[in-house]
Image (cartoon, coloured by chain):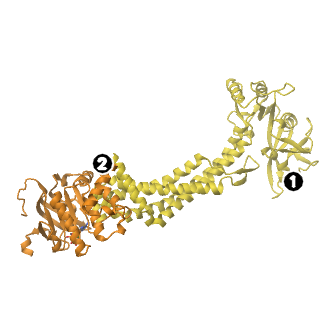
Chain colours: A orange, B yellow
């Protein structure tokens, strides 16, 4: 499962990936020869101790951070070969990010927040509004269109963030501890939505989490430790 | 293209909507830029008002003829033959006696004692022909009489008589070892001529050894437009190497020295202040970028380009500066426009004038404000565009 089992059309295909951080004279190696293949339609939970590189992996997958060596192919594109502006455009059409702290624009309403990714498309104003309504409907917030983030609970804010992530219909959702800031009940609501998005809308989801209960919503779990994936069974 | 515009618009809206969080810092920048513009416009409107006031005091239908290239009457010479050619020139009005209404004039300086300080100062002594007073607006005798031709008599402008000792009616004064009697005091509509002493031209010419030439010729034109005819006539005659201009144009030219000086004081001061406000703008915009780091990075993660972060930041800076500029212009308008001042110019006696703003000056003030906004926003905007997304998200 961890070596590329030649899925015909993988969503993610990482071969011998290296990632280092240099701070002054010090160099920290996060990944040194990482391999990973995730087929389309998968829902993977990535777990592992703090500092093991989970967030770094998501950043590489989403094309907001660069690798140092190796191949990284996501949604049919070799990210290690794209320029910054090509990456920007690629992100706009292929990736939906969901962050632990939602990262909504506090000065914009729910609808305006959700509309942001659509400003990068060719859609007209009317179409954009329809898409926004649909996306907010999917997360169950159709009645919160005009609310500002500060007028909503954490769970509601995260649902707005999910609506923003799916509104332009990207194939891959990258979630970094999406329930890390939520209580159990709210977390379950959010995770159920992710599950629906995976099952009914066919979104591929990679979700970093510390919470084994959250990982239960995924189809499978991967464990990252010291820069390598290890078999779940070995940890459990 | 449309997408880029939408991106820029969205980033700008987000920036501006987050302005209240940085209210005081932004306000400080606005006020600093406003002060710069106020100082600049105060000087420029002063210069403008001064020039316009002087120019307005000159008539359009009076021609002033000087030697070509002469900066003022003092260094002009017009020879007798040239005077005659001008008198016969086109566009010059004739009096009821059929004679051309012209006056050849000498412009000399003599010494006088200032009442206020007791110090010596030079006074203009003008020799003019019989038609000379009539070629100036509002010349009236307010005491005594006109000088008699061929005599050592002078008449004295009202302003000069007030400011200098010994020019009371009936007094005698000595210029160039000759004694002169004050036989009249005249007013001239408050113009510069009220600060002059007038005498008969031929008398001055012989006593000051200036026979055969004058310094200027003054003439009444048949209409303001006739100045062009007269100038063309002069330009086409090789014997006449002369500058022909209306009195208004001549006054404006004389005033421009002083108004240039005021402007030359205003611009460096305003630009020095602009550098100060630039430091403030830079600080404000760097703070703005730092405060918006997470938002910028989030937008970039969504797929917004670095360019929109750049432009959005620059636009915020330009808008702050523009608000400052508008406030500065409004302040100048409210405080200074029409504000009355007076000055002692080198070639003018006391001139009372108003500060005058004009759309052109306001445009210059706004341009300076926008320059501050542009340079104050440029480097912060570059930082916003180049900031690593990951650093913005988790830093
Ligand atoms: N920009 C950076 N510069 C230097 N070091 C970094 C940078 N980003 C991450 N690191 C380091 O890389 C390692 C992995 O970080 P990462 O954030 O990926 O861990 P994580 O698995 O997400 O941890 P957590 O569970 O605490 O979120 C850590 O040691 C971290 O200090
Ligand atoms: Mg992390």
Q: Residue most toward the front?
A: A143
> Crowdedness of circle 1 by 10 Å Cα count: few (<14), some, many (20+)?
some
Tell me: residue B57, above or below residue A63. above
Residue drawn at x 10%, y 62% is A35
Residue B47 placed where, x, y %? 65, 49
Q: Which residue is mark 1?
A: B165
Chain hosting mark 1 = B
Q: Viewed as shown, does residue B75 lie left or right of A2?
A: right
Q: Is mark 1 within 8 Å of ligand 1?
A: no
Instruction: Give the tally of numbered discs.
Output: 2
Q: Is residue B39 visible?
A: no
Give the structural element (helix, strand or loop) at label 2. loop
Q: Chain of mark 2?
A: A
Q: Is residue B382 visible?
A: yes
Q: Residues within 10 Å of mark 2 (few under 14, many from 20)?
A: some
Position above or below: B211 against B184: above
Q: Residues under labels 1 and 2: Cα distance?
A: 86 Å
Nearer the observer, disc 1 or disc 2? 2
Badge 2 is on which residue?
Answer: A123
B307 on left or right of A17: right
**Residue B137 drawn at (x, y percent):** 80, 39
Q: Do the residues indicated by labels 1 and 2 lie within the same chain of the protein?
A: no
Of B306 and B299, the residue lying toward us: B299
Q: In the drawing, does residue A199 fall left or right of residue B346?
A: left
Q: Which residue is drawn at the image coordinates 32% and 56% (left, top)? A: A116
């Amino acid at each position: 499962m961890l070596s590329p089992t030649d899925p015909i059309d993988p969503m993610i295909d990482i071969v011998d990936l290296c990632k280092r951080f240099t701070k002054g004279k010090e160099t920290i190696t996060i990944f040194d020869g990482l391999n990973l293949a995730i087929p389309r339609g998968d829902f993977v939970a990535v777990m592992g101790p703090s500092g093991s590189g989970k967030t770094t992996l998501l950043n590489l997958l989403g094309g907001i951070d660069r690798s140092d060596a190796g191949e990284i192919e996501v949604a049919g594109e070799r990210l290690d070969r794209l320029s910054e502006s090509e990456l920007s455009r690629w992100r706009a059409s292929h990736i939906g990010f969901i962050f632990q702290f939602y990262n909504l624009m506090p000065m914009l309403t729910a609808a305006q927040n959700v509309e942001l990714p659509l400003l990068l498309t060719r859609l007209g104003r009317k179409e954009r509004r329809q898409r926004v309504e649909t996306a907010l409907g999917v997360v169950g917030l159709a009645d919160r269109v005009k609310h500002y983030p500060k007028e909503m609970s954490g769970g509601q804010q995260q649902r707005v963030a999910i609506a923003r992530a799916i509104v332009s219909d990207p194939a891959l959702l990258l979630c970094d501890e999406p329930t890390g800031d939520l209580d159990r009940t709210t977390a379950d609501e959010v995770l159920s939505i992710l599950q629906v998005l995976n099952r009914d809308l066919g979104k591929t989801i990679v979700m970093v989490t510390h919470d084994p209960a959250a990982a239960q919503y995924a189809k499978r779990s991967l464990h990252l430790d010291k820069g390598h994936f290890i078999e779940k069974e070995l940890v459990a | 293209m449309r997408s880029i515009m939408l991106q820029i618009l969205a980033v700008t809206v987000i920036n501006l909507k987050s302005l209240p969080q940085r209210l005081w810092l932004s306000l400080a920048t606005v006020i600093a830029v406003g002060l710069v513009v106020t100082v600049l416009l105060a000087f420029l409107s002063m210069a403008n008002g001064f020039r316009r006031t002087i120019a307005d005091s000159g008539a359009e239908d009076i021609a002033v003829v000087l030697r070509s290239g002469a900066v003022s009457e003092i260094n002009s010479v017009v020879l007798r033959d040239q005077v005659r050619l001008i008198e016969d020139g086109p566009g010059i009005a004739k009096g009821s006696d059929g004679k051309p209404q012209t006056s050849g004039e000498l412009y000399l300086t003599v010494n006088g004692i200032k009442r206020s300080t007791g110090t010596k100062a030079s006074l203009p002594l003008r020799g003019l022909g019989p038609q000379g007073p009539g070629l100036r607006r509002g010349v009236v005798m307010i005491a005594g009489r006109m000088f008699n031709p061929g005599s050592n008599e002078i008449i004295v402008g009202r302003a000069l008589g007030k400011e200098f000792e010994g020019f009371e009616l009936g007094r005698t004064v000595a210029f160039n070892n000759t004694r002169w009697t004050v036989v009249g005091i005249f007013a001239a509509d408050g113009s510069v001529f009220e600060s002059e002493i007038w005498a008969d031209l031929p008398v001055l010419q012989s006593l000051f050894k200036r026979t055969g030439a004058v310094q200027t010729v003054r003439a009444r034109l048949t209409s303001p437009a006739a100045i062009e005819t007269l100038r063309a006539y002069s330009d086409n005659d090789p014997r006449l190497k002369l500058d022909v201009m209306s009195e208004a144009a001549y006054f404006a030219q004389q005033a421009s020295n002083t108004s240039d000086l005021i402007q030359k004081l205003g611009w460096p001061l305003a630009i020095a202040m602009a550098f100060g406000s630039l430091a403030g703008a830079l600080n404000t915009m760097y703070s703005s970028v730092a405060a918006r780091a997470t938002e910028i990075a989030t937008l970039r993660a969504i797929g917004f380009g670095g360019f929109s972060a750049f432009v959005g930041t620059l636009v915020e800076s330009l808008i702050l500066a523009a608000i400052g500029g508008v406030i500065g212009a409004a302040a100048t308008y409210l405080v200074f426009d029409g504000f009355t001042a007076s000055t002692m110019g080198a070639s003018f006696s006391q001139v009372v004038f108003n500060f005058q703003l004009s759309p052109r000056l306001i445009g210059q003030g706004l341009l300076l404000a926008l320059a501050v906004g542009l340079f104050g926003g440029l480097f912060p905007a570059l930082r916003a565009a180049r900031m690593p997304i990951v650093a913005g998200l988790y830093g």
